[in-house]
Structures are given as C-alpha cells and as structure tokens.
Image: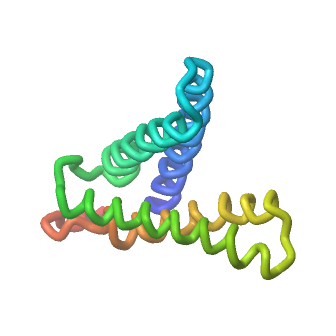
C-alpha cells in the first residue's frame, strides 16, 4: 500500500513537471526567447522542480544531500541516453515513426525513473529505521 501512494505522488509530480515544462517553454517563446535557450531554460526549471518534488513530496527525503543530487543528475543523464537510443536507433530500426518513438519514450522514461528513484536515487535512508505497524 505504501508503494501505491509513492507511485501516485510520483505520477502527480511527473505530470506537474511536464506541464510546467510546456508552459515555461511556450511563455519563453512568446517573450521572444530563442528556441534553444527557451528549451534549455524550461528544461532546467523542470529538472529543478522535479528534484524538489520527488525528493520532498514523493520520497520524503531532505533536499540538501549532495550525493543524492548527484545520483539524480546521473538519472537525468541516463534518461537522455534512453530517449536518444529509442528515438535515434530503436525506433528507426523497427521502422517506427518519430511520433511513435516519442510516445515510447513517454512510457519508458517514467518507468525507468521510478525504478531508479525508488532503488537508488532516493532509496531507503540507511539512518531511518522501519516503523512497526
């Protein structure tokens, strides 16, 4: 049951961050910011909010943990590699359209990120003892 709540919180943060990215990107474009810079700024904002939301809300971890943030950053890099692999190699080799490849990424990355966050990035705090019900 605890995992179910974590999954719901993970999904809420993920959907919120995706919406924030789209909104920030479109607002920046509307303000005349160049596309590449608008994307980089919106992406950076989304990653920062994702870290805060997933650490504090989803996994109940402190934010000021440099090793945790490093693991999170590695996870973001692995996500980029996964998306590049799916859209640049797997999709084309399977004869999939760009749209289908992109949709595959939207399914694979949340699963990959949830597993990495649960087991590695925000895995159980070794100083925390299990509470008995």
Occupied quadrant, residue 108: bottom right
- Residue 80 screen position, x and y as percent: 52, 63
Where does the image place residue 67, in percent across and percent down from the top left?
20, 63
* Colour scheme of the rendered structure: rainbow
| Residue visible at 18% across and 57% down in the picture | 66
Q: Is residue 12 left or right of residue 26?
A: left
For the point 34% across and 71% down, the residue is 120
Q: Residue at x 42, y 43 (%)?
A: 44
Question: Which corner quadrant of the image does residue 15 belong to?
Answer: top right
Which sits in the foreground, 81 or 61? 81
Which residue is at the far bottom? Answer: 93
Q: Is residue 83 above or below residue 31?
A: below
Q: Tell me if 61 is positioned left or right of 3 in this view.
A: left
The number of numbered badges drawn on the structure is 0
* Along the viewing direction, whichever of 6 and 36 lies nearer the viewer: 36
108 or 82: nearer the viewer = 82
Q: Residue furthest front?
A: 34
> Could you tell me which quadrant the C terminus lies in?
bottom left
Quarter where residue 53 is shown: top left
Residue 83 on image: x %, y %: 60, 66
Residue at (68, 71) in percent of width and height: 88
In this view, the residue in front, 4 or 116, is 116
Give coordinates of residue 28: x percent, y percent: 54, 25
Q: Is residue 95 left or right of residue 89?
A: right
Rendered position, 88 above or below 1: below
Q: Residue furthest left?
A: 127
Above or below, 89 relative to 28: below
Would residue 129 be found to the left or right of residue 7 on screen?
left
């Amino acid at each position: 049951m605890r995992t179910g709540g974590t999954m719901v919180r993970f999904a809420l943060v993920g959907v919120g961050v995706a919406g924030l990215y789209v909104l920030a990107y479109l607002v920046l474009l509307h303000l005349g910011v160049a596309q590449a810079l608008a994307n980089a700024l919106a992406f950076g904002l989304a990653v920062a909010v994702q870290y805060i939301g997933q650490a504090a809300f989803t996994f109940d971890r402190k934010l000021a943990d440099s090793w945790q943030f490093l693991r999170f950053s590695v996870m973001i890099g692995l996500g980029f590699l996964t998306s590049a692999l799916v859209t640049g190699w797997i999709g084309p080799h399977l004869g999939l359209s760009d749209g289908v490849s992109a949709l595959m990424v939207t399914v694979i990355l949340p699963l990959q990120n949830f597993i990495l966050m649960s087991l590695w990035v925000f895995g159980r705090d070794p100083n925390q003892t299990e509470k008995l019900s």
